[in-house]
Image: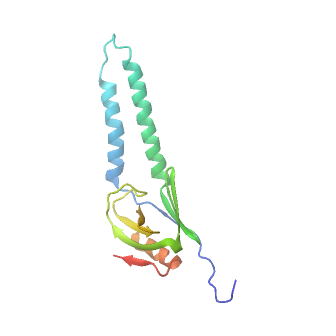
Amino acid sequence: MSADAAPPLPDEVFRSRVDAWLVVMIVAITVVPLVILMTVQPSRADLGAGAAVIIAVAAMALVLLLFAWTYRSTSYLLTDAALIIRCGPLNWHVAYRDITGVAKTSNPMSSAALSLRRLEIRYGERRYVLISPPDRDAFIAALRRRAPDLEVQT
C-alpha cells in the first residue's frame, strides 16, 4: 500500500426500512383466506374438502415463511469493493465502479425494498435496483465515501 493510499473503509450494513402497511397487507393476504377456509363447514360427502384445506394452509404457510425470510434478510452491505444487496433468496453484487448514480424515489416497482421511501441505484448500462435504507441520506453519504464521483439526484 502506498503512503498516500487511504486504508479500506470498514463494512457498513443498512437494514431495510419497513413500512407497517406492507406487513399488514402481507399478513392479511395470507391469514384472511385461511380464516375463511377454516370457518366454512364442508359437507360430510365432500371428502376432498379436508385435503383442500391442508393444501391451502401449506401454501399460505410457505408464503408467510418467504415473507419472514425476506423481512429478516433484506439488507444493504457496503464493502470495500461493492454494494451487496440481500433480499430473501435474491442477491445483487454491484461494484462501485459500475454505479453511475443514485436518486431518491418512491417507485413502487418490485425490488429489494420493504418501504416506498427508496433509493434508485443506477449501474451499468440502463440497469437499476431499488433499495430502502432507513436513513437515505446516511446511506448516500456512506456510498459516496466509497464512490466519490457518484452522481446524486435529490
Residue that lies at the very extreme toward the front in this rendered image: 125
Q: Nearer the viewer, residue 21 or 148?
A: 148
Q: How many marks?
A: 0
Residue that lies at the very extreme toward the bottom in this rendered image: 4
The quadrant of the rendering that contains the N terminus is bottom right
Q: Position of residue 93 (x, y in %)?
A: 54, 63
Q: Nearer the viewer, residue 125 or 117?
A: 125
Q: Position of residue 50 (x, y in %)?
A: 39, 19
Name the residue rendered at 49%, 81% in the picture: 148
Residue that lies at the very extreme toward the right in this rendered image: 1
Quarter assignment of residue 117: bottom left
Q: Is residue 2 above or below residue 99?
A: below
Is residue 138 visible to us here? Answer: no
Is residue 4 visible to us here? Answer: yes
Colour scheme: rainbow
Q: Nearer the viewer, residue 135 or 148?
A: 148
The quadrant of the rendering that contains the C terminus is bottom left
Q: Is residue 124 above or below residue 92?
A: below
Name the residue rendered at 30%, 25% in the picture: 39
Q: Position of residue 138 (x, y in %)?
A: 44, 73
Is 95 on the left or on the right of 115, as rendered? right
Is 133 on the left or on the right of 9, as rendered? left
Q: Nearer the viewer, residue 152 or 139?
A: 152
Name the residue rendered at 33%, 60% in the picture: 116
Q: Position of residue 3 (x, y in %)?
A: 68, 89
Name the residue rendered at 44%, 74% in the picture: 100
